[in-house]
Image (tube, rainbow, N blue to C red):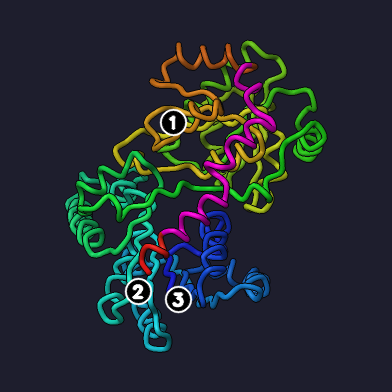
Amino acid sequence: MIILYITYDGLLDPLGSSQILPYVKSISKHQNEVIVVSFEKPERLLQDKGALLSDLQSYSIKWKPLRFTKRLGVFGKSWDLIRMYIKALMMACKYTIEVVHTRSHIATQVGVFIKHISRAKLIFDFRGLWVDERVDKGGWNLNYFFHRLQYSYFKRVERKLLAQSDHIVVLTNKVVDEIIEIGVTKKSNITVIPCCADYDRFSLSNETRKIDARVSLGIPADAFVIGYLGSVGKMYMLDKFFQLFVMATNTRTNCHALLITTETERLKQLMDRYLTNNLLKRIHVKSAAHDEVPDLLPAMDIMAGFILPTYARIGACPTKMAECFASGIPIVSNSGIGDVKQFIDQLDGGWVINSLSEDELMETVQNLDIISAKGGRRLRDVSRPSLGLELATKRYQSVYEKLV
């Protein structure tokens, strides 16, 4: 079949390189052609477009990038949506599109339009409860009338998009019943595909790789390292991460922390708020591109990450969980985040904190050696069938076969 794949996220974004491009490549192996419409940050497009085009030559993928509008707020987003409609319509006129595969809510609005004019099947890659995530991340404040208006409008749109999709892909088992409640009548039209990692890119952490990573970061070779990977914002509860770290330093003189994020300025503001000067010396901050992460993760003994457990989180699957497991690194997480607790329990892949109370954090600190011992080759091997890229490839292929 000829597939039209539409995403508002860029293939050149860190998310694109980890959670879009690998899936598109795997889909292209079983289809005649995949035409990808994506929105790219201008600076990344200028710097990396040639390298990606060269990489895609060995796949049956036609990439049609558009420039992401950074300014103008809601007007910039509206302009991008108009251009998405135009570009998708051009592709539908030029090619005989048989399946429209859209990633997230914005792109699916365009997907429904293309479905109606071309009679193509529509796959809604739902990714999460996007409308409610906007509230969690601070994009919409429901105390303001205009934001409440936007929220109500997009909740209605969400229901219509689900009802008009031929198949829905979600990230967690926990969100399936909610999707049915919102607008899907058949459970058979829903497939769960968690955020997976390419285990061939994330090599197993061993003593040599650990020392090499620590030397490059200025971390003592004999340190016990609590790691963090990802974004900085109110929903990521870094205050609890720092609280855990402070408790650990009170019992371990060799405890250090490694935080890998591109939002280093926001992170340093939080560090100044929650940490004393003597502890700042034990904090190592690294801004890294996604292709650098596999070489940095081995520096960690464990990875800790806490997320505000709101309603929207039932549909969330942190990419860093699969990436850490691929490297053989156990994780510490709070409960209420998608299927994370189920994965940790089934795979014996770390430690789950229920209430994030001081007592529970202290219990975690007292068990750091036990948690660290859960890592290694065993964790990598048992997690691969559940979170490896091979699983995503197999399930996406199954989705397409159902549509045929």
Q: Is residue 389 magenta?
A: yes
Magenta extent: 370-398
- Report which residue position mark 2 lands on: 79
Q: Earlier in the sequence, mark 1 or mark 2?
A: 2
Identify the residue at image location x=67%, y=45%. Answer: 202
Amino acid at dot 2: Trp
Where's the C terminus, which quadrant?
bottom left
C-alpha gap between disc 1 and disc 3:
36 Å
Amino acid at dot 1: Gln
Q: Residues within 10 Å of mark 1 (few under 14, many from 20)?
A: some
Q: Earlier in the sequence, mark 1 or mark 3?
A: 3
Q: Position of residue 396 (x, y in %)?
A: 46, 58
From the viewer's side, name the closer residue of 369 and 349.
Answer: 349
Q: Position of residue 290 (x, y in %)?
A: 62, 52
C-alpha gap between disc 3 and disc 2:
30 Å
Identify the residue at image location x=61%, y=50%. Answer: 198
Identify the residue at image location x=62%, y=28%. Answer: 302
At mark 1, the secondary structure is: helix
Marking on residue 388: none
- Report which residue position mark 1 lands on: 342
- Report which residue position mark 3 lands on: 1
Identify the residue at image location x=66%, y=42%. Answer: 286
Number of marks present in the image shown: 3
